[in-house]
Image (spheres, rainbow, N blue to C red):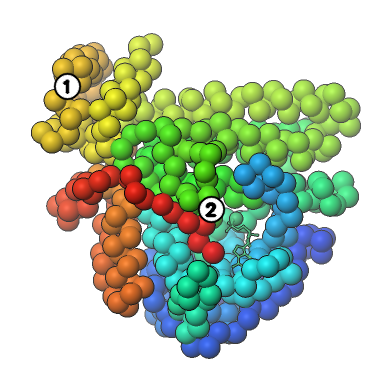
């Protein structure tokens, strides 16, 4: 293991103890004139890094200089992209090492946009500033929302331009993740490796993320079940805040249960299950309302890829896998329902809660109500007259039912309101706010709007005065908004 350097790095490279077939050694391609434009002070501190010496380390965050103990690699993986299976791999990302924090956590430190790798195919290995800032903002917002996610440590501009439809300023994002093991990593091993490779990968993943399973009699079945459990919980959390990932391809589904790969993701304004923002998702495969089912589809691909580890008897393996997969939707539903009860201030459970919840959602859909602000209004018990939903008689009837339901539980109104505040964000990174912040940063080199927005989003459950301005709806919610894959 590497010695601790003065910046606080304590790097290891456990992934490279897997067979060489899982990665390629590759150096970041130097960039001309790097400059740090975003630096996550609190994350650096949390990781035991020396924020003061890192905050201007453009050389390091650009890959021009590597810290002690770094042995950079690009990881190989495959994936189903919009249903089509293909070989992928880090085409523009480099893992410069696994940092061990002072409290013993192991996190991948990855540079995204750091140059070509053996997996780049036709791509240039580079990234544009706008999308990297967007990823930084969205991932940190998710962290603020208390949703498992990778984090963003820094963004540097490269001083070079990247050629897309037009030329954009180039940038590199430093990401921090519990790991970058994906469903796609297992698909890669299953398709192009030996059974031994697959088993080594599974053992590695268990060791890293589910060490409590190590001594189980059938640890691979338990492993599948745990990954399913984590993803069911994660996707329920997305649904509860109206987050749309946008590209739930199997290469973007983690084994750790964290959200990764913030490309065309966005938050829904108006409640509508069909909401899609991604320009390439023309059929709505990854629409808001499809996310839970697609999660199940992705996990089935995971189950298939580790099937041969689960039992020597093919029939038995299949049976175990099917049973685990069958659990997924009910686990998802359970998580979602639990979350919804909290959003409505309910501590206990009644049979009719489902009906109460679905009735509200139906009314929201019918009256094109803003998802976040509906729950925000219920939390504050303040109802904006301009929201059509709140004028509807059907809503007033629903409200009475809800009040009656609240009065049947032991907890006080204050306790219910507190629970609601903890579960209904007062603000989300609305599309127009994100665009405004990025536009200022990219076109005017003014990062103050983005910094201010990030600060407000660091605790979206605060219901503070500074957050008021961010709760205002755009003149035309959602409609014209389109997101791109961020290449
Ligand atoms: P993503 O849409 O970011 O999940 O990327 C899908 C695949 O395309 C991954 O293998 C990426 O590494 C690769 N890729 C995306 N953009 C580029 C690029 N500019 N250069 C090389 N590879 C890329
Ligand atoms: Mg990806």
Q: Nearer the viewer, residue 27 or 349?
A: 27
**Residue 392 bears which disc, if any?**
1
Q: CA distance from mark 1 to mark 2?
A: 40 Å
Q: Nearer the viewer, mark 1 or mark 2?
A: 1
Q: Earlier in the sequence, mark 1 or mark 2?
A: 2
Asked if disc 1 and disc 2 are in contact, CB closer than 8 Å, the reply is no
**Of helix, strand and loop, which one carries label 1?**
loop
The residue at the point 29 percent across, 25 percent down is 366
Ligand 1 under 8 Å from disc 1 Cβ: no
| Residue 136 at least partly seen | no
Q: How many marks?
A: 2
Packing grade of label 1 (10 A; few <14, some 14-19, many >=20) is few
Q: List x then y, in percent, for residue 237.
A: 44, 38
Q: List x then y, in percent, for residue 119.
A: 71, 65
| Residue 251 at least partly seen | yes
**Residue 487 bears which disc, if any?**
none
Q: Which residue is denoted by mark 2 in the rendering?
A: 260
Q: Is residue 55 above or below residue 84?
A: below
The residue at the point 50 percent across, 69 percent down is 165
Instruction: Locate residue 196 relative to residue 295 in the image: left or right.
Output: right
Ligand 2 under 8 Å from disc 2 Cβ: yes
Can you tell me which quadrant of the image ligand 1 is in?
Answer: bottom right
Question: Outermost residue, top direction?
Answer: 351
The residue at the point 76 percent across, 51 percent down is 188
Q: Quadrant of residue 229?
A: top right
Q: Nearer the viewer, residue 263 or 142?
A: 263
């Amino acid at each position: 293991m590497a010695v601790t350097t003065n910046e606080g790095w304590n790097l290891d490279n456990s992934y490279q103890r897997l067979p060489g077939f899982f990665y390629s050694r590759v150096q970041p391609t130097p960039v001309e004139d790097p400059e740090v434009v975003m630096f996550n002070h609190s994350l650096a501190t949390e990781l035991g890094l020396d924020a003061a010496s890192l905050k201007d380390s453009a050389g390091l965050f650009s890959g021009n200089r590597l810290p002690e103990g770094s042995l950079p690699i690009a990881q190989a993986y495959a994936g189903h992209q919009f249903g089509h299976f293909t070989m992928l791999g880090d085409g523009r990302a480099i893992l410069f090492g696994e940092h061990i924090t002072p409290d013993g956590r192991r996190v991948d430190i990855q540079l995204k946009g750091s140059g070509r790798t053996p997996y780049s195919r036709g791509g240039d290995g580079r990234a544009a500033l706008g999308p990297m800032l967007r990823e930084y903002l969205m991932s940190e917002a998710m962290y603020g929302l208390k949703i498992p996610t990778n984090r963003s440590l820094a963004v540097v501009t490269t001083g070079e331009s990247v050629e897309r439809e037009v030329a954009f300023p180039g940038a590199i994002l430093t990401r921090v993740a519990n790991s970058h093991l994906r469903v796609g990593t297992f698909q890669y091993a299953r398709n192009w490796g030996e059974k031994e490779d697959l088993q080594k990968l599974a053992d590695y993943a268990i060791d890293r993320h589910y060490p409590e399973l190590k001594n189980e009699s059938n640890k691979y079945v338990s492993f599948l079940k745990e990954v399913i459990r984590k993803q069911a919980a994660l996707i329920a959390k997305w649904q509860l805040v109206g987050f749309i990932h946008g590209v739930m391809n199997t290469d973007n589904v983690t084994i750790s249960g964290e959200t990764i790969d913030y490309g065309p993701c966005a938050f829904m304004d108006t409640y509508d299950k069909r909401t899609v923002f991604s320009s390439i998702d023309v059929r709505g495969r990854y629409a808001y309302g499809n996310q839970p089912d697609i999660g199940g589809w992705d996990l089935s691909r995971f189950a298939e890829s580790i099937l041969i580890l689960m039992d020597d008897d093919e029939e038995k393996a299949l049976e175990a896998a099917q049973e685990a997969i069958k659990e997924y939707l009910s686990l998802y539903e359970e998580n979602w329902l639990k979350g919804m009860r909290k959003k409505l201030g309910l501590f206990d459970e009644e049979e009719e809660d489902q009906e109460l919840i679905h009735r509200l959602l139906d009314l929201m859909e019918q009256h094109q109500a803003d998802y976040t602000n509906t729950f925000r209004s219920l939390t504050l018990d303040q109802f904006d007259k301009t929201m059509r939903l709140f004028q509807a008689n059907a809503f007033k009837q629903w409200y009475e039912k809800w009040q009656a339901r609240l009065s049947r539980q032991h907890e006080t109104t204050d306790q219910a309101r507190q629970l609601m505040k903890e579960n209904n964000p007062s603000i989300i990174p609305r599309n127009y706010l994100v665009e405004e912040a990025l536009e200022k940063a990219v076109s005017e080199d003014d990062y103050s709007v983005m910094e201010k927005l990030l600060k407000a989003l660091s605790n979206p459950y605060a219901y503070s005065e500074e957050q008021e301005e961010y709760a205002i709806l755009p003149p035309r919610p959602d409609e014209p908004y389109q997101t791109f894959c961020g290449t």
